[in-house]
Image (cartoon, coloured by chain):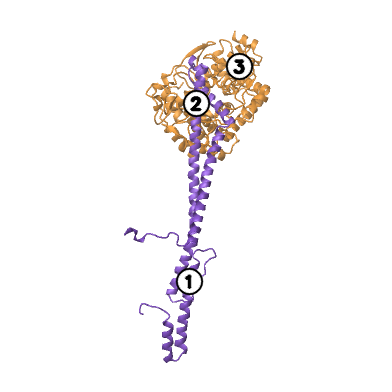
Chain colours: A purple, B orange
Amino acid sequence: MIFNNRRKHFLIDKSFQLHYVIYIVLTLAIILSVGMVGNYYGIWASTIKAFSEESLRESLITSAQMNEYEASRRPVSRINQMPSLRMYRETALLSQRQKEIIRQIMDDAHRKTIALGILLLFFIGWGSIFLTHKVAGPLYKLTQYMQELKNGDLTVRIKFRKFDEVRYLAVHFNELASNLDVSLSRIKKILKEAPSDSAVAEVKKELSKFKTSSD
Amino acid sequence: MITAFLILTYSIEIPCIFSDEAVNTVVAQRAVPLLSQEDRLLLKQIQKDSLEYFLAYTNPETGLTQDSSRSGSPASITATGFALASFAIGSVNGWLSYREAYEKIERTLDTLEQRTPNEHGFFYHFVDPKTGKRVWNSEISSIDTALLIAGALLASSYFKGTGLESRAKRLYDRVDWNWMRNGSRQICHGWKPKEGFLPYYWDMYSEHLILQALALGAETHAVPETVWKSWERQSEDWEGNKIVYSYTGSLFTYQYSHAFIDFKNLDDNGVDYFKNSTLATLANQKFCLLNAAQYQTYQNGIWGLSASLGPDGYQAYGAEPGTALHDGTIAPYAAIGSITFTPNESMNVIRTLYEKYGGHLYGPYGFKDAFNLDRNWWADEYLGIDQGITIMMIENQINNGDVWSRFMKLSAIRRWIERAKLRK
């Protein structure tokens, strides 16, 4: 039962659907490229900067200084003064600092990715409204004109924008409205101008153009 | 004997104050500033230029101050504490507008309240100036937190009736000083997340008196009175006087607490710490004099051994009494930081350093950290804490102890004096 309504043909309007495939794929490709390339180069730029010769030199000096600050507050022992121990401490501090730098770069990358994601979501939202407006707009317009038709105004004609989707519906709608308008105008004219005995025949002839549930 | 020695070896004219009998009265006489108008102008210039360090190296978004002017230097909470005090001082001196200073202090307090991690109210010693996060595996530091809080309390006292006062107080109130005792009699140096409490405690005289004052004077989480009594007052005889000395004999240990607290009218069971710092400064001066033949830097009346950068890195340089590590490196801030104890002696050094070595040693942010003529080494950087003590001590000296009078009015300080029984 479930499969009774399944789609057999996915491309029922190739031009229209392919059009939208291109729109969506292109938009997502741009978004992904910006996000990925931005992130990739962002991380690398930060890493290269953090581990540049100058930064490493600064880190080495700071590492030594941090160790010296700590040592200057503690009672000095011979063990503390051993060069190998001092070097070990400075290396450990430097290693710790490098971990902090990597963590900071990743934190920055995550923060930027989230910010970029929010920005892109905004653009996707805005883009979606723009794209769906090309379909929703004409459908909305069509509904309004149908309502007017239902209310008896057969003079309405639709004019869509140049790049609106389903523009062909306007042609069909306008033909329908025009046909009804012509027929009913004729009936009105017959009833107004023709002698009453021939009018019935004329009206019948005109109405025979329409197939109805009473036929 | 001492007088004769000094007159023979010291080129600067010194009043006859070093006779053995006179030593005890020396300290009181020295408290009287004898500075000329020129000296005052020079001190003002040094103070103003040193303030430029804090304006240049305080992150405009977080209000955290770099430890050093060197590129890549982390922010230090001690330097940040000194920055807060310096901005307030800059404001009363007209170098910053009231609004500028207020906004800078407010920005720092915002960061300390919201962004900088803390443990029981204590802060990490070194943090990222941009984010406030812990860096360099630094420790949660008791003394550095105390200096930061002292800076915040002092700065807020310049803005009476504003939100800064209550915010600085909140920062102070949330510090759980008792936690830092780790169940012991004394206050621990610090704590690290993985290692726990450091194996060092504030157990002898040093810069920790400001930490003691805040920990005993706190409304919340105050430590017991026994903590004040528990640290050892190790003393040594110097020129007929006892000096309660710090382990390294570095001058900064005799200055940091004194930048905030006026010890002149306080008596700790017979110890007057103002007099003590004066004697320690004179001992430092004499130590340099005695070693002047060995080290060229100490000639021309130059003295000032204190923790600073040196040709072999940062060292806790000092004089006797203490371990007296020295290699001919002099830190200009050492003499400046002692200006309230030894105005004339300090001024002589400041003038010589400025006039004779200013080309190498003086820059846009005041005096650079240190120099060593024997190794032809000149520091190329400024340290925040050294610029900070410079600004505060000069302010006390030339503005009638303005910092002291503001800080001594704090209820916390009054409570500490009561609890430690320090009234004369």
From where the camera sits, is residue B385 visible? no
Q: Residue B400: give x, y in percent of width and height.
A: 57, 27
Using the image, determine if residue A213 lies above or below residue A191. above
**Residue at (47%, 75%) from the top-left corner?**
A177
- Camera-near label (1 vs 3) is 1
Q: Are marks 1 and 3 in contact (CB under 8 Å)?
A: no
Q: Residue B387: give x, y in percent of width and height.
A: 58, 28
Q: Are marks 1 and 2 in contact (CB under 8 Å)?
A: no
**Residue at (41%, 85%) from the top-left corner?**
A204
Q: Nearer the viewer, residue B127 or B368?
A: B127
Whether discs 1 and 2 lie on one chain: the answer is: yes
Query: How far is mark 2 from mark 3, CA to CA?
Result: 29 Å
Residue denoted by label 1: A172
Please report, as a chain letter, where disc 2 is located: A
Using the image, determine if residue A190 lies above or below residue B274. below
Query: How far is mark 1 from mark 3, CA to CA?
Result: 100 Å
Q: Amino acid at mark 3?
A: Gly
Q: Are marks 2 and 3 in contact (CB under 8 Å)?
A: no
Residue denoted by label 2: A93
Q: Amino acid at mark 2?
A: Leu
Q: Residue furthest left?
A: A1
Query: How far is mark 1 from mark 2, CA to CA?
Result: 78 Å
> What kind of element bears circle 2?
helix
Residue denoted by label 3: B328
Q: Say which quadrant the N terminus of chain B sits in.
A: top right
- Camera-near label (1 vs 2) is 1
Q: How many marks?
A: 3
